Image (cartoon, rainbow, N blue to C red):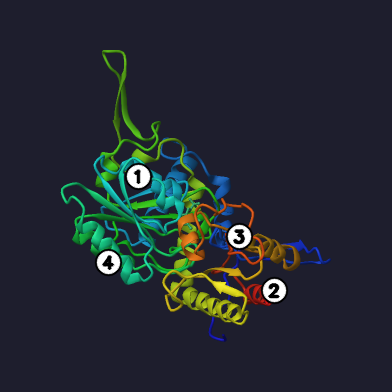
């Protein structure tokens, strides 16, 4: 523990909350997988820039020029953070959900999409207009690769195909074999998009090294504030697609046609899919977070996170009523996202008690990954509740779970308090 670095300073680190048992306690934010607290450094960078911000791309004024530079530099910083190829495009979006919907809107009309049923709904659901094959939950990383290979071998190889896969599960925290899945996709002439919403905050993501065609992530899980995300990768499908949003900024030239309509030439750069005034502060804050994480060093951050994971796992293992959820088995490498159920406890009541009695913020429910959580709980889809629906009666199987998640800003005391509270 001595060699583990200190947590990075984050917002909200000294917020106190009242306890039902009387008194108050500093809030222990253990729901990083939903939204991580912003790094103090990101907030400081935004505060330093805020007085100077102006409209980007079209303003002649000094502050507009400054903001345009910062916005385009942010694009370069994030592309560098993701180790993008020189001709990749990086589009600023609202979130991972937005990024994947953008890509879904841009895939060629005859594209076949392959997606595991275990995905977060953001990567499971946007493909409605494509021909989608939903792959059954694998129980080992190797089975994931074999399942994909079998499905791709059966496809019609003439048309385009896309595989969508998560890098780290938002439910179990388990790492998926992205490099192997990318190799399998490419061997069968398919492309692959990586949902890095949970991976990027915890591990370096190299588009080149993983050999993925696109990557998507959200700023608010990467220690930047809400409202901005990224889609980066191959330019060709994006340049050939209709703009995600139609409007100013995406259009290079608009003229009236003789028949009374309008003719539009769209940009081919990232601007094609960034119509309207962009979220400049959002882009700037993601770039600031990328710099802060790079400067802190992922080796150091991973070592600290593994130390926290060890504490939580050891603590939960000492409570016989607790069952930690895992798709691939206990030995699988994971990020700081751990879901569990407690025998004899309603998960929602359990999570509410952690908050009310200990000042600990976790999440309960199905985590926007209903098929995965059902598989993990072995529950029947017909009786399975919706998000936030009532829990199983005592003695029955749990219908939802509790999730604890943490990261670069988490002090040891938070996970120690959590383990003691569960105990
Ligand atoms: N993918 C994964 C793996 C996630 O965990 C999440 C957020 N829980 C998303 C996608 C969607 O991210 P956002 O809500 O920021 O769009």
Secondary element under disc 3, as helix, strand or loop, is strand
Marks 4/3: CA–CA distance? 32 Å
Pick whichever of labels 4 and 1 is earlier in the sequence: 1
Residue that numbered label 4 is attached to: 146
Image quarter (top left, top right, bottom left or bottom right) of the C terminus:
bottom right
- How far separated are the C-alphas under marks 4 and 2? 41 Å
Among the two numbered marks 4 and 2 on one chain, the one whose residue lies closer to the N terminus = 4
Cβ atoms at labels 1 and 3 below 8 Å apart? no
Residue farthest bottom in this picture: 2
Considering the numbered disc 4 on the image, is that residue within a helix, a strand or a loop?
helix
Indicate the position of residue 205 as horizontal and vertical percent values: 38, 65
Quadrant containing the N terminus is bottom right
Q: Secondary structure at mark 1?
A: helix
In the image, residue 291 sits, relative to residue 133, either above or below, namely below
Q: Percent position (x, y) of residue 211? A: 27, 63
Q: Earlier in the sequence, mark 1 or mark 3?
A: 1
Could you say which disc has been placed on residue 377 in the image? Answer: none
Binning the other alpha carbons within 10 Å of mark 1 as few (below 14), some (14 to 19) or many (20 upward) gives many
Q: Look at 27% across and 66% down and name the residue there.
A: 146
* Residue closest to the eye, 344 or 193: 344
Looking at marks 4 and 3 on the same chain, the residue that comes earlier in the sequence is marked by: 4
Q: Determine whether label 2 and label 3 are within 8 Å by CB.
A: no
Residue 27 visible, this angle: no
Residue ID for mark 1? 104
State which mark lies toward you, 4 or 2: 4
Q: Secondary structure at mark 2?
A: helix
Q: Residue at x 54, y 80 (%)?
A: 310
Q: Which residue is mark 2?
A: 421
Q: Position of residue 67 (x, y in %)?
A: 47, 45
Read off the residue under disc 3: 364
């Amino acid at each position: 523990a001595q060699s583990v670095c200190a947590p990075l300073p984050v917002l909200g680190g000294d917020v106190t909350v009242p306890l039902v048992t009387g008194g108050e306690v500093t809030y222990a934010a253990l729901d990083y997988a939903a939204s991580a607290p912003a790094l103090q450094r990101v907030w400081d960078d935004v505060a330093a820039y805020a007085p100077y911000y102006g409209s980007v791309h079209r303003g002649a004024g000094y502050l507009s020029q400054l903001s345009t530079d910062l916005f385009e530099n942010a694009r370069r910083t994030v592309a560098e953070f993701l180790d993008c190829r020189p001709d990749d495009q990086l589009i600023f979006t609202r979130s991972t959900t937005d990024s994947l919907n953008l890509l879904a809107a841009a895939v060629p009309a005859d594209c076949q999409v392959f997606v595991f049923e275990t995905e977060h709904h953001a990567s499971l659901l946007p493909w409605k207009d494509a021909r989608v094959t939903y792959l059954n939950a694998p129980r080992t990383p190797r089975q994931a690769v074999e399942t994909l290979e079998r499905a791709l071998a059966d496809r019609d190889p003439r048309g385009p195909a896309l595989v969508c896969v998560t890098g780290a599960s938002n439910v179990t925290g388990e790492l998926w074999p992205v490099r192997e899945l990318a190799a399998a996709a490419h061997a069968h002439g398919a492309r692959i998009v990586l949902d890095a919403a949970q991976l990027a905050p915890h591990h370096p993501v190299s588009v080149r090294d993983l050999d993925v065609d696109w990557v998507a992530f959200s700023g608010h899980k990467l220690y930047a504030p809400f409202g901005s995300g990224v889609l980066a990768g191959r330019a060709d499908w994006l340049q050939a697609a209709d703009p995600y949003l139609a409007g100013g900024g995406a259009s290079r030239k608009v003229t009236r046609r003789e028949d009374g309509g309008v003719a539009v030439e769209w940009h081919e750069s990232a601007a094609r899919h960034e119509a309207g005034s962009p979220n400049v502060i959002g882009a700037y804050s993601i770039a600031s977070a990328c710099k802060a994480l790079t400067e802190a060093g992922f080796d150091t951050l991973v070592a600290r996170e593994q130390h926290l994971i060890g504490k939580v796992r050891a603590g939960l293992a000492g409570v016989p009523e607790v069952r930690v959820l895992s798709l691939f088995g206990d030995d699988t490498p994971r990020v700081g996202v751990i879901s569990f159920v407690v025998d004899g406890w309603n998960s929602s009541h359990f999570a509410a008690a952690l908050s009310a009695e200990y000042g600990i913020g976790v999440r309960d429910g199905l985590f926007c990954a209903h098929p995965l959580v059902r598989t993990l709980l072995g529950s029947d889809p017909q009786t399975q509740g919706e998000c936030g629906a009532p829990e199983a009666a005592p003695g029955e199987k749990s219908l939802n779970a509790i999730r604890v998640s943490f990261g670069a800003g988490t002090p040891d005391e938070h996970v120690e308090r959590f383990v003691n509270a569960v105990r």
